[in-house]
Image (cartoon, grey):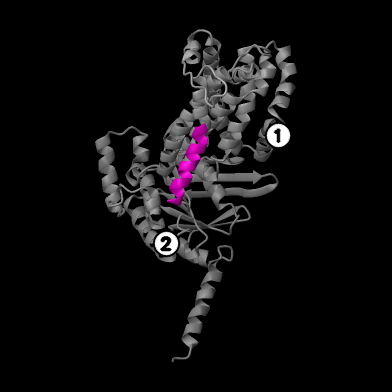
Amino acid sequence: MIAVMDFQKKYGNEIVLDGVNFVLEKGKTLCVTGASGSGKSTLLRLLAGWESPDAGDFRIAGKSMLHIPPSQRKVVYLSQEPLLFPHLSVAKNLSYGLEIRRLPGKVVRERVGELAQRLGLDTQLHKMPDQLSGGQKQRVSFGRSLIIEPEIFLLDEPFASLDHQTREEMQVLFGELRLTFSMTTIFVTHDIKEALMTADQLATLKGGKLTVFDQVQDFLASPESGARKELDFWTRIQQLQQHEPQQ
Amino acid sequence: MMQKTLNTLIIIFLALPLAALLYLSAVKFWVYPDLLRAHFSLEFWSGLGGTYSGLTSSFALSLLMATSISLTATGLGFFFSAFLLLVPGRSTWLALSFFPYLIAPVSFGALLQTYFVRFGLSGSTGGVWIAQLLFVVPYANILLSTFWNRHIRQLYQQAITLGARPLQALSGIILPLAKPWLGLSLLQCFLISWYEYGITRLIGIGKVQTLTVGVMHYLNEANPHVAALAAILLVSPVVLLGAISYIVVGKLSLQV
């Protein structure tokens, strides 16, 4: 279980996070929605350890992470850019986390092979990142993180730069992976549909405050989440289609 | 065909002065009215071990100085430019790095001279080394700043997030990506130090005889044969480095 307690962060006079609290069970996904600049990415950066909060605590299984360096937190941050290492092949990108832990070559090869097959990358292992499509790059990025079995995945709009079809494929793949690997994930997105598809828990960040919704209905009904507006929009589209004269 | 002819012309254009220098260093007398000096002799070349051993020691000193300055400046420039990515006011620091190049090297040397005299560094090899380094490090910083950007920083953080220690991320991810920049910086810093004249003259006050200073000495003596020999020594590592960097940097850029 992870717990974030009273996280606060200010840049100059601007309050970005103002007492953020939440608890997330192991293997669950919390989706955080919110407008651009609402502090979603800042929250993830604090959890990853790239920045320190001004106040508050962050615990994994009861242990405070604040003084643990990012490399030892077992918290993986994935952004919308896949950030593959451009000078390493797909196989080497996938095995990077294992090789720096000096695991035996045989174990590394086996685990890379197994994961590559699961991600549909088994025929791409020899390729360099610039030879892959956007979706394939994200698969490698996911695989590279999954292979080290982190405690938490921090996903910062990971599918935002993908085309519509690839994005849907990746959402489905993520759904499968999170169940298979029992991933504990904090998923930041401004896409309400994506949030509804992927989340166990939903939350909205606005004005530095995080509102966590216990029920999906509460999320949908909340004016803060923006879901109401999106639902209204689709309802109107549906109504327009129903009233369209048949040709 | 046109491109091939152009390449050949460029090669001839670059090689011709070298050939002329080589010829001048390997002939002895000139009998009027002969057009060419036809008395071939290796006297000047063999003099490198005796009569002109000063050139040999100047060559060794320049080689040692330029190599050590190139390595030190590139190392310092790499870490300084990386540090600038993390601190506010990056553009101010970068603008300051241009200062030695906005004023002439001689003026830069003149600015430093007072301090070097005060600290007893004037006229010493160590003093010239430090003065050249102060001139070259800002260049390395400017050059290597073009490598560091948000994307490189994110790749570094990605490696750390996957469990790499900072040194592992540096050696496994950052340095391989920076190889073309480091190669270019090593070459350019070497060249700046190798050909440096103004600061060396001012801080070295004639006591530190680098090869560039030596060439000027023989030119002033109006000895074209020894001056040609010194000039060949002066350009030889540069031609060699140019060829190596052309091959190595070219290959590395293709890999990255």
User: Which is more toward the observer, A211 or B177?
Assistant: B177
For the stretch drawn in magenta, the main secondary structure is helix
Quarter assignment of residue B141: top right
Q: Which residue is mark 2?
A: A167
Circle 2 packing at 10 Å, graded few (<14), some (14-19), many (20+), is: some
Amino acid type assigned to the residue bearing label 2 in the image = Arg
- Report helix, strand or loop for mark 2: helix
Q: Residue furthest top?
A: B50
Instruction: Decide: is A192 above or below B50.
Output: below
Residue at figure coordinates x 66%, y 15% from the top left:
B204
Q: Chain of mark 2?
A: A
User: Which is more toward the observer, A165 or A242?
Assistant: A165
Of circles 1 and 2, the one toward us is 1
- Looking at the rendered image, the quarter that the N terminus of chain A falls into is top left
How far apart marks 1 and 2 lie (CA) works out to 51 Å
Q: Are marks 1 and 2 on the same chain?
A: no
Residue at figure coordinates x 43%, y 54% from the top left:
A29
Magenta span covers which residues? B1-16
Q: Which residue is mark 1?
A: B102
Q: Residue B80: where, in percent of width, then height?
A: 59, 31
Q: Please indicate, yes or no, whether residue B153 appears anywhere in the rendered image.
A: yes
The answer to if B14 sits in the magenta stretch is yes
Q: Residue A200: where, in percent of width, then height?
A: 43, 57
Circle 1 packing at 10 Å, graded few (<14), some (14-19), many (20+), is: few
Q: Chain of mark 1?
A: B
Q: Residue B215: where, in percent of width, then height?
A: 60, 20
Amino acid type assigned to the residue bearing label 1 in the image = Leu
- Looking at the rendered image, the quarter that the C terminus of chain A falls into is bottom left
Q: Residue A201: where, in percent of width, then height?
A: 46, 57
- Report helix, strand or loop for mark 1: helix
Residue at figure coordinates x 48%, y 88% from the top left:
A244
Q: Please indicate, yes or no, whether residue B165 appears anywhere in the rendered image.
A: no
